[in-house]
Image (cartoon, rainbow, N blue to C red):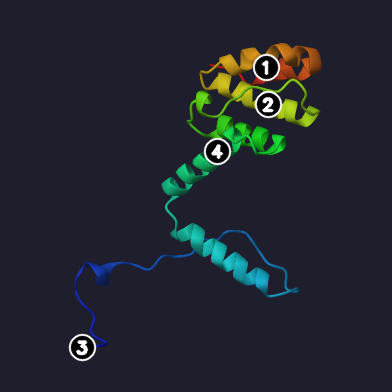
Amino acid sequence: MLGRRSNGPAARRTAPRARVTGWTLPLTGRPEGLFVLKNAMQTLRASDAGLLRQSMSDLLRDVARDERSGGVAKSRACLALARSSKEKPDDFWAGVPAEVSELRFRENLLAARYLARRGHPQAWDEVKTAGLKREPELVAYLESNLTTD
């Protein structure tokens, strides 16, 4: 009975439709990029957003807490979690080491301010004191522009 269509629920299901992404590939170059982009888009379309969000949150939390992670990776993971997750700061925030680069310190200041905005002011209180010595203009800017209302 090949070639017959059933009248059940599977027959009424519509095929997924591709949305316009705005991503384009150059007309020159190696063809592998085409297949990478095609497969990446297909993976994203077929994925469950909730599952991806939780997996990414778990990955970032592990990077932020792992002793073997590099300093830049840790501060970026903390910033991403502070900015866009609902994770509790106790799960990933470890404070700011005394000797960090200017970039990492600024990332930690921003992450702490986002945490304060989410209702967890402890990280901001901890970093703000050091921030007033190293980056007083940035502290003033963050306090006035990322309010906790």
Amino acid type at circle 3 is Met
Mark 2 neighbour density, 10 Å: few (under 14) some (14–19) many (20 or more): many
The disc, 1 or 2, on the residue closer to the chain's N-terminal end is: 2
The disc, 3 or 4, on the residue closer to the chain's N-terminal end is: 3
Amino acid type at circle 2 is Asn
Mark number displayed over residue 127: 1
Of badges 3 and 4, nearer the viewer stands 4
Give the residue number, with chain letter if any, for mark 2: 108
Residue 10 position (above or below residue 127): below
What is the distance, in whole Å, between disc 4 and disc 1 at their CAs? 22 Å
Return the residue nearer the eye: 142 or 133: 133
Q: Quadrant of residue 142?
A: top right
Secondary-structure class at tag 4: helix
Return the residue nearer the eye: 71 or 80: 71
What is the distance, in whole Å, between disc 1 and disc 2 at their CAs? 8 Å
The disc, 2 or 3, on the residue closer to the chain's N-terminal end is: 3
The disc, 4 or 2, on the residue closer to the chain's N-terminal end is: 4
Amino acid type at circle 4 is Asp
What is the distance, in whole Å, between disc 2 and disc 3 at their CAs? 65 Å
What is the distance, in whole Å, between disc 3 and disc 4 at their CAs? 52 Å
The location of residue 114, given as percent across then percent down, is: 59, 25
Q: What residue sits 60% from the left and 24% below the top?
A: 94
Q: What residue sits 58% from the left and 26% below the top?
A: 93
Q: Quadrant of residue 24?
A: bottom right
Amino acid type at circle 1 is Val
Mark 4 neighbour density, 10 Å: few (under 14) some (14–19) many (20 or more): some
Secondary-structure class at tag 2: helix
Give the residue number, with chain letter if any, for mark 3: 1
Image quadrant in which the N terminus is located: bottom left
Give the residue number, with chain letter if any, for mark 4: 62
Mark 3 neighbour density, 10 Å: few (under 14) some (14–19) many (20 or more): few
Residue 18 position (above or below residue 80): below
